[in-house]
Amino acid sequence: MLFQIKGERRSNGSLAVTADAFVSICTTFTEERMTGKIMKGIGGFYYVYVEGSGLYECRARGIFRNKKMKPNVGDVVDIDILSEEEKTGNLVKIHKRKNQLIRPMAANVDQALVIFAVHEPEPNFHLLNRFLITMEQQEIPVIICFNKTDLATTEQMQQLEKDYENSGCQVIFQAAATGEGIAQIEELLRGRTTIMAGPSGVGKSSTLNCISKEKQMETGAVSEKIKRGKHTTRHSELIHIGEDTYLMDTPGFSSLFLENIEKEDLKYYFPEFEPYENTCRFNGCCHIHEPGCEVKKALEEGKISKLRYDDYCMFYEELAQQKKW
Ligand code: GDP
């Protein structure tokens, strides 16, 4: 490697290097700046994946503490490489976030993929509908995957399709066991960062294995590196499954508490109500007890899913009770 060094020749023949040139030489030898994505944060370390280079264990510089800015999983960051051999670096800059989710804690999320089984276990629709609301609150589009279609009848799937056709979500029927629907899911994930959620036993791991078949070795290596140390609690973690394509398996899905919603606003989280919103007899109709309610009429005519409407009423009551506490 040849360097051209700016400096002045002293009378004794040695070279006086300017401060700038000195810094530039040191940087060249010790640090290279790269841009990557935070896959996981644990015990003060951030694991940053750089496309084409791999995973680096990084510490955040003090400047983030001073600015009260905490790096997040999903953040696009600049890192200075400390050792390419040991794959270590310093996190020096967080790029501007597209969004910042609170539940789960993650930045730059494009969409959510929620998986339920058609059977075994039976779908918990209350949980699914709650999840849709929390995602809508955070303006994250949702893809609903009904897995284990090999265990379902055509009628059951038709009913599910009908219940969710106007929910504002894309609905996919899949079977990790047979590979049905996997290509469609892969297509939707490509080039995006997706959070994956669903109760246990529905087939999340099986689906992930289908999606990231050729990536499994790499994913294994990432997990190995991260497992090092004594932190074993489950944290949110991104998995790299293709170019610019990331998936986050989110822990803690068993109960979702609705918060920061006024009961009067709950209706806006049910996109299927929207066509009828301004046609009810009363302004500000809540679509529950009021006469001349077009939503209830649509429900009676089978244009709105009873399953979804019943949950709307249940959540409305829940929010009304919350206010009383
Ligand atoms: P997770 O807890 O959501 O990660 O679920 P797993 O992927 O561990 O799957 C739970 C069980 O469901 C396992 O016994 C899987 O073999 C089974 N399973 C997953 N996908 C399918 C499917 O498409 N059809 C059937 N019949 N079983 C499945």
Image (spheres, grey):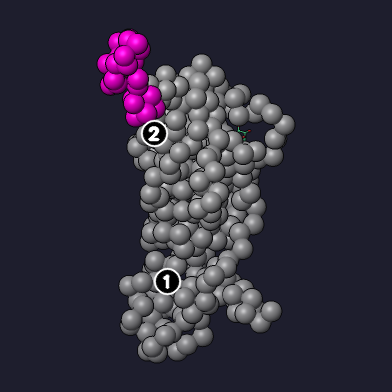
Magenta-drawn stretch contains 226: no
Residue 182 or 304: which is nearer the viewer? 182
Q: List x then y, in percent, for residue 247.
A: 47, 38
Magenta-drawn stretch contains 14: yes
**Where are the magenta residues, as a range?**
1-24
- Whether 262 is drawn above or below 188: the answer is below
Query: Of all residues shown, which one is farthest toward the front?
Result: 11
Q: Amino acid at mark 2?
A: Thr
Q: List x then y, in percent, for residue 197.
A: 54, 46
- Whether 6 is drawn above or below 38: the answer is above
* Ligand 1 quarter of the rendering: top right
- Whether 230 is drawn above or below 311: the answer is above
Quarter residue 62 falls in: top right
Discs 2/1, front: 2
Q: Report crowding for label 1: few under 14, some 14 to 19, many 20 or more residues within 10 A (C-alpha).
A: some
Residue positioned 57% across, 68% down in the render: 259
Residue positioned 61% across, 45% down in the render: 251
* Quarter placement of the N terminus: top left
Q: Is residue 70 left or right of residue 37?
A: right
Residue positioned 42% across, 19% down in the render: 29
Residue positioned 59% across, 75% down in the render: 319
Can residue 139 be seen here? The reply is yes
Q: List x then y, in percent, for residue 193.
A: 42, 42
Q: Which residue is mark 2?
A: 35
Residue 141 or 82: which is nearer the viewer? 82
Q: Which residue is mark 1?
A: 268
